[in-house]
Image (cartoon, rainbow, N blue to C red):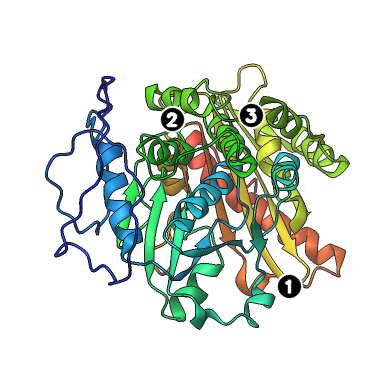
């Protein structure tokens, strides 16, 4: 249930920590000023899944204080910031903001993802801003010395969409920070958790951290301007160009407007679609079926680097007349690792349809209890590993047969919710 929140006046207060609350090295350390609203009593442990309730005007200050305490306890460490395999502008920008925040505590963070940047705007964002994100494939991960990291961080995801999570957990690296705006995907223990499903973008949460004083943006510092531009792009993309934005999203955008570079953002947004993306959109148009205002399209096999063509095709199909929800899916093939996964995206304009509930009900969970997908307001996605059936597509007849089986199964699961009386498999 959403409650109306009111705008409050913020007082400038400096954060005071008692010696017994956190261990401080004997070496001198100057605490960054933290500007925040007056705080109520806090449990101080920062642990457990924190589902924020809207209407708590001191929430941003409270969580900023908890995050600062957590970072103080991890000074001089080295952390991994793990993003989803195919990071979007929201994830990329927030990871960068987190990295800039932690630099003040002498924490070295490396931003990593296992997949690829295939959306033209994401590629432009990283190239034009020099955003420090690295691709770690599962093959290259074998040569990494994970023992050099004292903690890892999840931003804009909860590990369900990252191949890196299991390897990091097996290495015994603890989860230090989790910040996300998606619904809960499972139980994760972290020192600091800030999960707010009602917030439209994780960029909004990180902008609130900046407003609370965890990092003082300076328009004369190029890196700050570029990060603010990235955050504005992340906020804009996850709120559908602010059309689905809530009050706190608009307030975050207003704050970022003082620092971001409008020309740089426009250059990022002007990135052109590739021919391969246009081909996938064309395939989705040819293959779509429309029932009860749902448009469902399978687009066959895609290269790993073209994965982001799937959500772009869903964005396009949902604009058709008399369609309020579009689902596009395909089999994405990674030639390097001989892996295949069914990847799909959902877009909806129907206010009463919850993408998170719809996808979880349609595709369920794996043997470990992890859902194959989830979502947020207006959008969702799913990834289903193909396991033993991955690869071996040299025989075109076999590849065609394998696709037809997966195509029919996905349609059957979706149409059970769209039209329970329909049977997509014709005898």
The furthest residue to the top:
321
The answer to which of marks 2 and 1 sits earlier in the sequence is 1
For the N terminus, the image quarter is top left
Write the residue at 24% across / 59% down.
47
Numbered tag placed on residue 417 in the rendering: none
Image location (x, y in percent) of residue 368:
40, 69
Q: Point out residue 145 in the picture as x, y percentages from the top left corner.
A: 57, 82
In the picture, measured across the screen, residue 162 lies left or right of residue 398, that is left
Secondary structure under the numbered disc 1 in the rendered image: loop
Distance between the Cα atoms at labels 2 and 3? 17 Å
Q: Name the residue under label 2.
A: 353
* Figure quadrant of residue 331: bottom right
The residue under label 3 is 290
The residue identified by callout 1 is 338
Residue 362 versus residue 245: which sits nearer the camera? 245
x then y, percent, for residue 231: 55, 37
The residue closer to the viewer here, 298 or 145, is 145
| Residue under the image location 24 percent in, 33 percent down | 37
Residue 198, image quadrant? top left
Q: Nearer the viewer, mark 2 or mark 3?
A: 2
Indicate which label's residue lies in the foreground, 2 or 1: 1
User: What secondary structure is found at the residue carrying circle 2?
Assistant: loop
State the separation of the CA atoms marked 2 and 1. Answer: 36 Å
């Amino acid at each position: 249930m959403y409650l109306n929140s009111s705008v409050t006046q913020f007082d400038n207060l400096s954060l005071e920590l008692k010696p017994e609350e956190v261990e401080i090295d004997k070496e001198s350390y100057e605490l960054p000023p933290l500007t925040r609203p007056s705080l109520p009593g806090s449990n101080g442990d920062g642990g457990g899944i924190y589902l924020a309730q809207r209407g708590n005007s001191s929430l941003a200050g409270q969580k900023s204080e908890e995050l600062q305490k957590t970072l103080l306890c991890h000074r001089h460490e080295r952390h991994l910031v793990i993003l989803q395999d195919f990071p979007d502008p929201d994830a990329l920008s927030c990871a960068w903001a987190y990295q800039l925040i932690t630099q003040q505590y002498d924490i070295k963070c490396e931003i990593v993802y296992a997949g690829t940047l295939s959306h033209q705007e994401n590629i432009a964002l990283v190239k034009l801003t020099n955003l420090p994100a690295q691709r770690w494939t599962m093959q290259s991960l074998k040569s990494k010395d994970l023992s050099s990291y004292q903690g890892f961080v999840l931003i804009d995801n909860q590990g369900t969409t990252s191949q890196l999570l299991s390897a990091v957990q097996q290495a015994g690296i603890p989860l230090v920070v989790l910040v996300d705006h998606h619904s809960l995907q499972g139980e994760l223990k972290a020192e600091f958790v800030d999960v707010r499903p009602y917030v439209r973008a994780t960029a909004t949460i990180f902008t609130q951290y900046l407003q609370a004083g965890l990092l003082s943006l300076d328009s004369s510092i190029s890196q700050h301007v570029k990060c603010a531009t990235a955050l504005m792009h992340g906020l804009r993309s996850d709120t559908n160009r602010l059309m689905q934005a809530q009050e706190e999203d608009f307030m975050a955008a207003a704050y970022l407007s003082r620092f971001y570079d409008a020309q740089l953002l426009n250059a990022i947004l002007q990135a052109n679609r590739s021919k391969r993306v246009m081909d996938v959109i064309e395939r989705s148009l040819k293959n779509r079926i429309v029932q009860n205002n749902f448009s469902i399209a399978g687009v066959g096999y895609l290269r790993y680097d073209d994965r982001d063509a799937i959500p772009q095709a869903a964005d396009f199909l949902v604009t058709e007349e008399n369609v309020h929800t579009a689902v596009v899916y395909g089999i994405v093939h990674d030639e390097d690792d001989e892996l295949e996964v069914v990847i799909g995206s959902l877009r909806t304009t129907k206010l009463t349809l919850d993408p998170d509930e719809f996808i979880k009900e349609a595709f369920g969970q794996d043997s470990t209890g992890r859902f194959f997908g989830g979502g947020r307001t207006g959008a969702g996605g799913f990834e289903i590993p193909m396991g033993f059936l991955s690869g071996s597509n040299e025989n075109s007849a076999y590849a065609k047969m394998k696709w037809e089986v997966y195509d029919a199964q996905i349609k059957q699961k979706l149409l059970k919710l769209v039209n329970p009386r329909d049977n997509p498999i014709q005898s």
